[in-house]
Image (tube, rainbow, N blue to C red):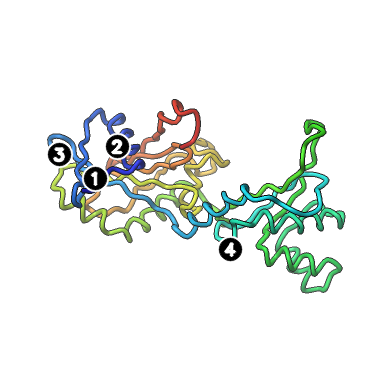
Amino acid sequence: MNQERPDERRAKRIIMRELGISLDHADKNGGVDYRSPDATIAVEVTRVTDEEVRKGLRAWSESDKSPISGPPLKTCWLVFTSQTTPGLKTYRQRVHPLIAQLEAAGLEEFFDQQAGLHVLQGGELAELFKKLLITKVEHASAVPHTGEAGPDHVHRVFITVGGGGSASGSDEAVALLSESLAAKTDNAVKLSASGADQRHLFVWIDGATPFDIERALSHEAPSWDDDGDSGFGLPTRSPTLDPAITHLWVMHERSGRGWRWDGASWRALEDLSLEHEGGDA
């Protein structure tokens, strides 16, 4: 018998709250995840994510647990690298000595493209820059303190991982999400076999979802509900869905922000349970 997953239960709560209905767990031995008691509504819960990126993010979170050796820093640094950089579990430990060398050379910033040109031209810091490029440092920047750090403060390197690229807005996110869902044919098969009048697909996205999709619903600027010209508000484009899917729900797991497509228009969603939990899930 298939058991409810935590993300399935969370999706069920959101749908029941939004629609004012009850849902019963239906996926005992296959089939859709939930049905309404009168069987007119069926719900399937899925996720659009990159498992390799998810593994990388888990490894990166482990790097804080290991000690760091190397010369002390004069200030803190921000270092940016990709979600798919190899060896993220020990990344902080490997990059700290290189950042100390940057600092000792009197630099406060590093950009990979500029560094690549410096290496090709045989500049005086070519060897150090090669090591930083091999370590997949995309950008590093010193963060001077303004007096708020106490005498016991230990300067450190803070790592930020991301998917890179650019995101043009919510409509692009919908188009790319539609393409990803088209490749996950099992969702439509299950919903079609349900025989329900309304067939809802609930899609979780997260930090390991392709950047052009997840950016629109993350807490990153531009904000998810920007009503200016950034294109990161509610989508204006209809999703391209298999006919078996009549309703689409999309929610960012961390931010708790999302959208709901009812077959005719988009509405904003918010996971109110995050307010009671006091933070991101």
Identify residue type, mark 3: Thr
In front: label 3 or label 1: 1
**Closer to us: 32 or 181:** 32
In primary-sequence order, the first of circles 4 and 1 is 1
Q: CA distance from mark 2 to mark 1?
A: 9 Å
Q: CA distance from mark 3 to mark 2?
A: 16 Å
Pick out the residue farthest to the top.
276
Determine crowd level at label 3: few under 14, some 14-19, many 20+ residues with C-alpha closer than 10 A: few
Residue 12 disc label: 2
Residue shown at 79%/37% (left/top)? 145
- Counting from the top left corner in percent of width and height, residue 34 is at 22, 41
Identify residue type, mark 4: Pro
Q: Helix, strand, or loop for circle 3?
A: loop
4 and 1 marks in contact (CB < 8 Å): no
Residue 86 disc label: 4
In primary-sequence order, the first of circles 3 and 1 is 1
- Counting from the top left corner in percent of width and height, residue 230 is at 54, 43
In the picture of the structure, the residue carrying the numbered disc 3 is: 40
Residue 33 disc label: 1
Q: Quadrant of residue 22?
A: top left
Q: Helix, strand, or loop for circle 2?
A: helix
Q: Is residue 206 left or right of residue 99?
A: left
Q: Helix, strand, or loop for circle 1?
A: loop
- Counting from the top left corner in percent of width and height, residue 199 is at 22, 45
In front: label 2 or label 4: 4
Residue shown at 76%/57% (left/top)? 97
Determine crowd level at label 1: few under 14, some 14-19, many 20+ residues with C-alpha closer than 10 A: many
